[in-house]
Structure formats: structure tokens, C-alpha cells
Image (tube, rainbow, N blue to C red):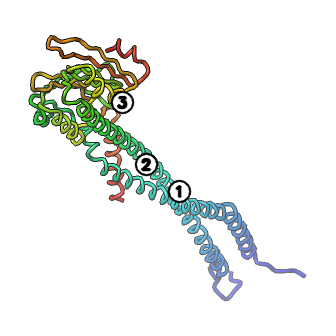
Amino acid sequence: MKISFPRHLLYLTLFSIFMIVFAIWFATEKLIPLGREYKKERLTLKKEKIDLQRYQDFYDNTLSIYNQTKRKNRNIIEAFETPFDAQKFQKKYTKYFIELHLSKVVPDKKEKWYEIYEVNTTSKLKSPSGFYRFLDSLNKSDWIVGVTFPIRFVREGELIHSSFRMHIYKKNDEKNTTKSSESMQHKALKENSSS
Amino acid sequence: MKYSYIEPRKKSPLTPEAILVLTFFGIAFFLIFSTYGFLLFKEYRTADEIRTIYAKKSELKNSINEMKAAIAFIEKEANLANKIYTTNSVLKDSIANLFDLVPDRITLSKAVILKNGLILYGITPNKEIYSYMLEAPLRSIFSKTHTSFYQLDNGWLRFVSTNYLESDFEDFIHEN
């Protein structure tokens, strides 16, 4: 018995088989691995998004602590950043004395974080109470001023002549961390607002 | 010469079966390739998003570290400032206490307040008044006290009182 099978149908069958084989190969070798890869990356993205949110929360928390610390210590920060003005100091604190003279002393060694002005002060006062008020007001001054030993009081008739040294603490420019962090914070805030 | 009475049909390779098969595979491959393209695009986007997240995380990490350093620096500044303020207040109290300590009958001509001691120069009517009214309280404050007296023409005594807080008293006297 002879089976009659048209030639064009044979070609079509062969073509179909080839196409099916190609489709299976493409699906197993390319499509499914790519799909798996994509699924894996989606999981990674999800994890990274959660991690980023944690970072963002921690950043916000740190920023709020930073702002709070800055707000709390604003006067101290400003006092450290204000350059010492001997004339202004003299003008402001002469009221506690009859006379007040300042002379800058070059320190022997440079301090690590702060430049120290040593100021020789000679003053005349009627009673020590003026000196007490002066010491009280130093803690509210525009600068961070520390009176150091030795302190000399010498009686000259009705007046008391006092001499002592003061350290004016000024932030060293090399260690200007606060300023750099301010610019960093500003940058971050700008980026946050733009996104 | 003709063998058939009908006109010969025009033969085409696109038989209805072939069209059917081609349409089927055309649609099937379109779907497969478009899925592949879609997955490629999505994978690229996801990878890009992950890269952006990494960069953002690194930036946040740096910012957090910088802020932490700034907070530590501010706290250091605040501690230093508070220490200075406390020292000034303690100094004020110490000077006030010193002047309160001196009785009316003794007149001070000079007082030197040192980090670990006190030197007083003055005049007293006699040694007893000095001993009871000034030396006794000074001894209760300082660990070592040494006083020298010099007779004045009017009968009063000029004194130099050196008081020190620590044991190295001899060195202190030589230094000052």
C-alpha cells in the first residue's frame, strides 16, 4: 500500500517541527533564565528598598538629633565661631572696672582644636564685687572666655589692682567640622526636596 | 497541443495550510520575543533602580557619618564651654570665699591666687590675731601653710602667707 503524502505538506511539517524545537530551546535557554534573573532582581530590589527606608529613617533621626544639638548649643557654637574683638570686649566689660586694659599674648604652643588668645588684663576696681559680676558676665559673653591662674590682686590705696590671664577659645579652621556638615546637610535637604 | 480542457491553476507556495502554520508560528514567536524584550527591559530597569539605591545608600551613609562627627564635635564644644563656665563660677566663689576669710583687723596688700595655692601679703596688728583669725581657716583649707612675719615701725607686722594644697610644698615655695 502506498501512502500518498504531498511534498509541500512534508516541508510544512518539517518547518513546524523546527519551529517548535526552536521555541522550546529559546524558552528554556533564554526566556526562563531571564525570567528567573528578573524575579531574583525584583526580590533584591524589594530588600534594598526596605534597607534604604531604614537608612532614610536613621538619616532623618540623626538629622533631627543634629538639629536639636545645634539648636541647644547655638550660643556656644556661635561663641566659638565669633572672632575675638579686644576693643568690643573692653567696651563691654569696662563697666565692671575703673580701668581695663588688654594685651594679646602669643601662646607657646598651638592647641589641638582651639586657638587660644592669652589676654593680659590689668584693671582697677573699688571692691571685689565688680570682679565677681565680671566673672558672672563672662559666661554669657559673645566668646568662650576662661579666666586662668594666677590671679593677682594688689591694693593701691583705696583701689584694688588686678591682673590675670584669659583664654579666648576660638574654633580652629582646620577642624571646621560643623561648617562642612552644614553644607552637607544643606545638600542633602536640597536633594530630598527635589526628589 | 492541449492535454486538458481546463486552464492550469496558478501554483503558490502559500497554501492554506502553510498560511495557517505561518500565522500560528508568527503569533507564537511574536509573543515569545515580546515577552523576552519586556523581561530584558524590566530587568535593566530593576538593575538600574538597584544601582540608584546603592548610590543613595552610600550617600546617606556618608551624610550620617558626617552628621555623627558634627554632633560629637558640637558635644565636645559644649562640654568644653560648660567646663570653662564651671571653672569661672568656681573661681568666682573661691575669690569670694578668700575675701570673706580675711577679718577686718587684718589688711591685705596683695593676694596671688594660684592653681594649687594662695599667697597672701598683708599687715596684722599682732601674730595672735593672724593665727586665730586667718591662719586657722587657711590651715583648714590648705594642706601646707607657711607664714613669714616682718616687724614694721608702727609695731604692726607685715606677713607673707604661702598656702599650698598638695604635699610638694618645698617645690612650690621655690617656684613662687
In-front residue for pair A116/A67:
A116
Which of the two residues, A83 or A191, is positioned nearer the viewer here? A83
* Secondary structure of the residue carrying numbered label 1: helix
**Residue at 69% across, 68% down:** A19
Q: Mark 3 is on which residue type?
A: Ile
Question: Residue B50's x, y, as percent?
Answer: 51, 56
The quadrant where residue A64 appears: bottom left
B65 in relation to B29, above or below: above
* Quarter of image, res A47: bottom right
Provide the secondary structure element on which disc 2 rests.
Answer: helix
Disc 2 from disc 1: Cα separation? 25 Å
Query: Residue placed at 46% from the left, 50% from the top?
Result: B55
Does label 2 or label 1 sit earlier along the sequence?
A: 1
Give residue A65's mark.
none
Q: Which residue is labeled 2 in the image?
A: B64
Tell me the quarter of the image containing the N terminus of chain A: bottom right
* Tag 1 subunit: B
Query: Which residue was labeled with disc 1?
Result: B47
Q: Nearer the viewer, residue A71 or A58?
A: A71
Q: Nearer the viewer, mark 2 or mark 3?
A: 3
Task: Give the spatial CA distance, label 1 vs label 3.
Answer: 75 Å
Q: Residue B173: x and y, percent?
A: 35, 14
Q: Residues within 10 Å of mark 1 (few under 14, many from 20)?
A: some
Report the amino acid beneath label 1: Ala
Please state the chain letter of the residue tagged with numbered disc 2 in the rendered image. Answer: B
Q: Is residue A93 left or right of residue A49?
A: left
Residue extending furthest right?
A1
State the image quarter where residue B152 is shown.
Answer: top left
Chain bearing tag 3 is B
Check disc 3 and report its element: helix, strand or loop. Answer: helix
Labels 1 and 3 within one chain: yes
